[in-house]
Image (cartoon, rainbow, N blue to C red):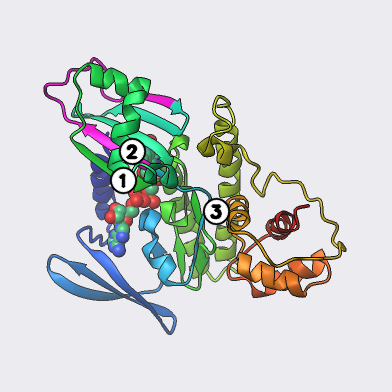
């Protein structure tokens, strides 16, 4: 089944269940008013508005609404997908629809897939900064794909990529996935590397969990939204460990930038070496390279805030306490400690 077919079937099911679904509309404004929401949206028929008790942000990776409510995206990498399409016609391939091939390369990985209408898609997965070295995503694709087994086989058989598009495929999570009268689901809450092939499944599961949380809210059960946020974060941490396990299976290019970043320990895996009473002696001059490294290891940490707190704290324990009081969004003690260790080079 193709994605548009899947979406159409799902829409039909929702309508049959008696739900008022407006598929041709784009939400463009959200405002909390007393205990309700004012939502403005646009459709072919013009602008309109409605009042709702609860808002679910299901807008995908862009997470349009959660960001407008003050949430921040924590980015765990800068993976992009550059995709070339070959429409069926001159180019003949023997692979049946649904066939997928995956290949690792020194600068990322790529896959080819055959769609239901026999269109072939080839996606190059690499980091945004690596692609930028070629001048544009299209140039990166046209330069790099022929050097892969997947690409060279296609080109040998006369395949030509007509359309080339690029989109973000980075691993990210919101620092706040729910709040008063709202929550985010699917890719809007957190999105996974396409290598995991889990986005659709997790989006549906998070929709089910969100429905339970909203129902609990209506029943005035305490902490329903906090529980939901905790579930989301637990699932994300599990995914981070899985992602690391898969990338570390590839050892041929462990010194190349793309793989080095994915082999490096993230904050979940880093050991805690600092004693709570460790006395802080901190030099606030932090190089841009070090800042970037710490952002890769612990994306949830507001480095400027931590540097400020560290320069006034006397112990590690005090740093954690003061940082948590001032930080926006939830952050664990371990995230703070690992960032402190990196800053103090412990
Ligand atoms: C290259 C690539 C390959 C992938 N391959 C796979 C795979 O093989 N298997 C898999 O399971 N997953 C895969 N995924 C991930 C999968 O596509 C997503 O995880 C999944 O689509 C998430 O569903 P979602 O409903 O949360 O978000 P989306 O599918 O992004 O849906 C969000 C919807 O919100 C709508 N929207 C946005 N803004 C507004 C607005 N203001 N008003 C109204 N509507 C709005 C959008 O139009 C869109 O329809 C892949 C992703 C990428 C980038």
Q: Is residue 216 left or right of residue 48?
A: right
Q: Which residue is mark 3?
A: 232
Q: Residue at x 49, y 67 (%)?
A: 71
Secondary structure, mark 3, is helix
Residues under labels 1 and 2: Cα distance?
6 Å
Disc assigned to residue 136: 1
Q: Residue at x 53, y 34 (%)?
A: 256
Q: Quadrant of residue 166?
A: top left
Residue 50 placed where, x, y %?
28, 75
Instruction: Name, please, the residue furthest toward the bottom.
Output: 34
Give the mark nearer the N terminus: 3 vs 2. 2
Q: Residue at x 19, y 20 (%)?
A: 158
Q: Is mark 2 within 8 Å of ligand 1?
A: no
Circles 1, 2 touching at the beta carbon (< 8 Å): yes
Q: Is residue 193 left or right of residue 145?
A: right
Residue 246 placed where, x, y %?
55, 32
Secondary structure, mark 2, is helix
Disc assigned to residue 140: 2
Q: Of discs 3 and 2, which sits in the foreground?
A: 2
Residues rendered magenta in the picture? 81-103
Give the vertical position of 97 relative to 177 (above or below).
Answer: above
Residues under labels 1 and 3: Cα distance?
35 Å
Residue 251 placed where, x, y %?
58, 26
Q: Of discs 1 and 3, which sits in the foreground?
A: 1
- Mark 3 nearby-residue class (10 Å; few <14, some 14–19, many ≥20): many
């Amino acid at each position: 089944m193709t994605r548009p077919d899947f979406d159409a079937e799902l829409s039909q099911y929702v309508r049959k269940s008696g739900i008022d679904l407006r598929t041709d509309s784009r939400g463009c404004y959200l405002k909390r008013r007393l205990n309700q929401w004012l939502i403005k949206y646009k459709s072919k028929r013009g602008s309109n508005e409605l009042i709702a008790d609860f808002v679910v942000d299901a807008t995908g990776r862009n997470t349009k609404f959660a960001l407008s409510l003050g949430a921040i995206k924590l980015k765990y990498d800068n993976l992009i997908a550059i995709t070339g399409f070959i429409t069926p016609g001159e180019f003949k391939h023997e692979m049946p629809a649904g066939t997928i091939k995956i290949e690792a390369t020194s600068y990322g990985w790529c896959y080819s897939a055959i769609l239901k209408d026999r269109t072939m898609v080839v996606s190059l997965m690499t980091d945004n900064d690596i692609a930028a070295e070629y001048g544009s995503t299209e140039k990166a694709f046209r330069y790099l794909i022929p050097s892969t087994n997947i690409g060279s086989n296609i080109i040998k058989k006369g395949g030509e990529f007509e359309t080339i598009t690029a989109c973000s495929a980075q691993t990210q999570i919101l620092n706040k996935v729910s709040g008063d009268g709202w929550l985010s689901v699917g890719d809007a809450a957190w999105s996974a590397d396409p290598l995991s092939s889990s986005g659709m499944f997790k989006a549906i599961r998070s929709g089910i969990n969100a429905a339970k949380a909203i129902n609990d809210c209506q029943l005035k059960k305490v902490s329903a939204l906090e529980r939901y946020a905790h579930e989301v974060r637990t699932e994300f941490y599990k995914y981070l460990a899985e992602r690391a396990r898969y990338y570390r299976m590839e050892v041929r290019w462990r010194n190349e930038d793309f793989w080095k970043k994915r082999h490096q320990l993230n904050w979940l895996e880093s050991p805690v070496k600092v004693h709570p009473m460790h006395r802080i002696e901190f030099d606030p001059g932090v190089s841009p390279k070090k800042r970037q490294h710490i952002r890769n290891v612990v994306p949830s940490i507001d480095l400027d805030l931590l540097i400020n707190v560290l320069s006034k704290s006397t112990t590690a324990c005090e740093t954690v306490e003061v940082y948590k009081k001032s930080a926006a969004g939830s952050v664990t003690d371990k995230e703070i400690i690992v960032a402190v260790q990196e800053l103090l080079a412990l």
